[in-house]
């Protein structure tokens, strides 16, 4: 059990002789109570209580998703399931929940969403195989019904999990309580708090080994460290204020399940004190922009740790897999949305006489120019309108320089133009580009040359190394609210971390992003 020095931190209220010694003794007593060889009493009970709430809610959501998938499967295979009983449905539901548990969907520390989707897919495959083995004979209806139910459980389970997670985040129980230590701890804590889906909930920061824990709280519009001074209800002195601050720090360390060491504190002697606390995990953060960060692989090189750098998106078999996904999505989508495209084209012509579609040159793979199809959402003299507007409005000029988009764009057709842009329906004709092979369903968006030229040459080369996409990571997160730096960060992340699971995750998240018109302009 390490000593924690609270002297000279500048965070405890001073006053009266010997206050520091008494505070130190009190903190040590509390730490020994709650951070001894076994996490004791209240702290361990609170962690288990959180886990029970989260696990119960996740299982409830998964049960609902599995039953919905079973119902859809039975509707699709109506009349082809002789002898199917409620007991069979209950057994299948239990089998899927068991597979999800074995694949780590209910672990004490929640994984990030792309990894959770991968595990969900594996669980569906395991459950499907087990059902066929247990079900006995190769009945065609069993293969079909079970396969459809297993397949549908992946997207339905993903959406059910998102619904459950959003409500648990609001109640402050999603994510393992986390202490962030080291230089830049406050910035990293803000980043984690802004992305609760990562499963780490910052509750305190430690700036140096010889300093105490600063509480960290999330306000509705501002995320920041909470100084002890903000908690004072009595004047500082050697009495209640010091006692309250000491109790608070002991409680924070006792409640924390995870500790993160920032990149500036990677030296073992700098974070060794963290490993002596009974945290479930101690994570050493590392800035590695050139390597993948999702499911990073390491290799033992004796006393040196090797990071395996791979670019899965460039491997031939992965390119074939990505193309197969493109066709599997595009062909049904063209049949489904073909009539809608026709109706929208008619609405555009009624709003502004002229062609309903237009073709725009965009930068594609290897830097070559591709002809991208779109429904026309702007006036025919859009470029002249834009030039006049930017010349007359300095604020609009600054917005254009930062985003290459305008919140109040004078080029957009009233009514139908704004609608198809907010919902991204103007992009539907690009399904033909995907079918032709100019684009992929998922990838960095194809930008006009004037937009691409705003990026540096290194990122331009990286971006041109992959096919552009109909949707991408930028579209499901920032969309038009993200400036050029955000676009570069997210597109780089996608390219360097590509897997088929990232593509599936982006496809699933595109649906709510389009329906809510998040960040659209």
Image: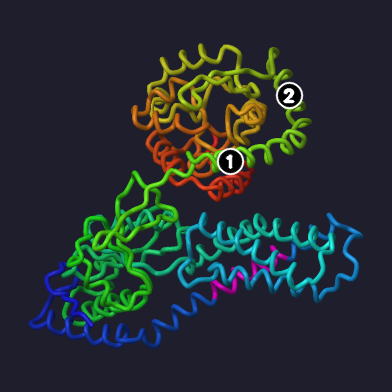
- Left or right, 360 with respect to 353, comes to left
Q: Which mark is residue 322?
A: 1
- Left or right, 442 with respect to 208, comes to right
Relative vertical location of residue 428 with respect to residue 44 in this rendering, above or below: above
Q: Nearer the viewer, residue 374 or 235?
A: 374
Q: Position of residue 279 (x, y in %)?
A: 34, 75
Asked if residue 52 is among those painted magenta in the image, a careful observer would answer no
Q: Residue at x 26, y 86 (%)?
A: 32
Q: Residue at x 53, y 31 (%)?
A: 468
- Left or right, 261 with respect to 49, comes to left
Q: Which callout, 1 or 2, points at the residue further toward the start of the chain?
A: 1
Residue picked out by circle 2? 347
Q: Nearer the viewer, residue 183 or 444?
A: 444
Secondary structure, mark 2, is helix
Name the quadrant containing residue 68. Answer: bottom right
The C terminus sits in image quarter: top right
Relative vertical location of residue 18 with respect to residue 11 in this rendering, above or below: below
Badge 2: residue crowd in 10 Å (few <14, some 14–19, many ≥20): some
Magenta residues?
53-66
């Amino acid at each position: 059990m390490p000593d924690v020095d609270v002297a000279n931190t500048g965070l405890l209220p001073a006053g009266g002789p010997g206050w520091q010694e008494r505070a130190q003794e009190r903190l040590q007593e509390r730490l020994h109570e709650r951070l001894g060889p076994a996490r004791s009493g209240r702290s361990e009970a609170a962690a288990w209580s959180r886990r029970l709430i989260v696990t119960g809610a996740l299982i409830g959501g998964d049960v609902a998703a599995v039953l919905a998938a079973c119902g859809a499967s039975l509707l699709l295979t109506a009349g082809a399931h002789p002898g199917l009983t409620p007991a069979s449905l209950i057994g299948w539901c239990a089998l899927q929940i068991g597979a999800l548990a074995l694949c780590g969907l209910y672990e004490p520390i929640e994984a990030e969403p792309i990894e959770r989707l991968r595990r969900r897919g594996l669980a569906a495959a395991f459950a499907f195989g087990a059902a066929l083995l247990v079900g006995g004979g190769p009945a065609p209806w069993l293969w079909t019904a079970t396969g459809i139910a297993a397949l549908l459980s992946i997207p339905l389970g993903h959406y059910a999990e998102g619904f459950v997670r959003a409500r648990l985040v609001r109640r402050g129980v999603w994510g393992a309580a986390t202490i962030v230590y080291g230089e830049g701890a406050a910035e990293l804590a803000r980043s984690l708090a802004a992305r609760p889906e990562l499963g780490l909930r910052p509750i305190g920061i430690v700036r140096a080994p010889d300093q105490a824990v600063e509480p960290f709280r999330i306000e509705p519009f501002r995320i920041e460290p909470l100084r002890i001074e903000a908690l004072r209800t009595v004047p500082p002195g050697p009495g209640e204020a010091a006692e309250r601050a000491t109790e608070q720090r002991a409680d924070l360390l006792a409640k924390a399940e995870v500790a993160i060491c920032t990149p500036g504190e990677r030296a073992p002697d700098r974070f060794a004190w963290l490993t002596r606390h009974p945290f479930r995990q101690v994570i050493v953060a590392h800035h590695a922009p050139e390597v993948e960060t999702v499911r990073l692989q390491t290799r033992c090189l004796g006393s040196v740790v090797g990071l395996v750098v791979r670019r899965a998106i460039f491997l031939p078999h992965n390119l074939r897999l990505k193309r197969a996904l493109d066709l599997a999505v595009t062909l049904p989508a063209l049949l489904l949305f073909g009539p809608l495209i026709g109706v929208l084209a008619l609405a555009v012509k009624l709003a502004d006489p002229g062609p309903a579609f237009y073709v725009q040159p965009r930068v594609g793979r290897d830097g070559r120019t591709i002809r991208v199809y779109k429904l026309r959402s702007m006036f025919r003299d859009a470029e002249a309108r834009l030039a006049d507007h930017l010349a007359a409005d300095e604020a609009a000029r600054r917005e254009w320089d930062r985003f290459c988009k305008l919140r109040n764009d004078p080029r957009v057709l009233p009514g139908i133009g704004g609608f198809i842009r907010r919902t991204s329906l103007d992009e539907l004709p690009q399904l033909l580009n995907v079918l032709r092979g100019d684009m992929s369903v998922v990838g960095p968006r194809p930008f006009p040359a004037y937009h691409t030229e705003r990026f540096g040459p290194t990122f331009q080369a990286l971006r041109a190394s992959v096919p552009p996409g109909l949707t991408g990571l930028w579209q499901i997160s920032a969309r038009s609210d993200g400036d050029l730096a955000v676009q570069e960060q997210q597109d780089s992340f996608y390219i360097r971390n590509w897997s088929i699971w990232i593509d599936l995750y982006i496809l699933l998240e595109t649906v709510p992003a389009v329906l809510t018109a998040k960040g659209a302009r």
